Amino acid sequence: MKKILFILIASMLYSCSTVSEKSDVLNTNFTKLRSITPKNLEFSGKVDIDMNGQSLSLNTDIYSAASDSVLMILKAFMGIPAAKVYADPMTFLAYNALENKAFYGEPTKKNIEKAVRIGFSYNDMIALLRNEPNLELDYKVNQEGSNENEILYYRYFKDKYIEFIKYNKNENYIVQYQQKSSDNTLLLNVFFEEPKVVGKRNMPHKVTALIPESEGSVKFRFDEIKSIDRFEKGFNFPIPNNVTKIKL
């Protein structure tokens, strides 16, 4: 019921130009959230991918160095490597071991989905994993959708879509994130659940991303999220010579 109510509130907000706005506290909240998120994080668990009628269930290890770069390792049965994905704000590299192919190019949603069936851009991936907004600026507060426990934020993103973030003040983490198109079509709907303390803040150990356009979903369930002092080496990796390389 709460999920349905959130979507209804978001729809009303998008179509109404007289919504009360308040922007003085939101940057403080998001800046605080980012400041207490461990810089280096290591995730271990499972990911279930359902895209275009095809389903995969894989074990995964993910490494995040702030918003600088991320490495995702996907493992099939008995720990057999299935794929590796490296991404930073400018580029990504995905090695599909099962098909003996490597993809590279700009880290857009379309490109990453072609490579590993996960329909997120780099910025989406970082926000999803680290439970942070893509940026701390330009969000506004919808008072009607907020209460003493939760704040509903929104912002327009380069005239491409509008973002909604529901932030739990008591638990100090983002509980839901949405993207909607200019014609009010739901593009992405993410739920963050099962918060547990990592460092100085709660991190969700269950993340469910629904992608209505493709009737797909990506579901992460992390057994453990650890704060790491430093990574010994960079995340980028070499591709074997006998692998077919495809630029996207």
Image (tube, rainbow, N blue to C red):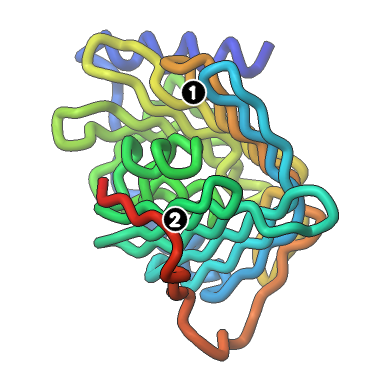
Image location (x, y in percent) of residue 227: 66, 75
Q: Where is residue 207, by image quadrant?
A: top right
Mark 2: few, some, or many residues within 10 Å (few <14, many ≥20)?
A: many
Residue closest to the far right: 78
- Residue found at x 56% / y 85%: 231
Sequence-first disc among 2 and 1: 2
Q: CA distance from mark 2 to mark 1?
A: 21 Å
In the image, what residue type sits under mark 1? Ile
In the image, what residue type sits under mark 2? Ala
Using the image, determine if residue 246 lies above or below residue 236. Answer: above
Which numbered dot is residue 226?
none
- Residue found at x 49% / y 34%: 177
The residue that label 2 is drawn on is: 94
In the structure shown, which secondary structural element does the residue marked by tag 1 occupy?
strand
Q: Is residue 140 left or right of residue 79?
A: left
> Quick check: can you spot residue 87?
yes
Image location (x, y in percent) of residue 232: 56, 90
Residue closest to the far bottom: 232
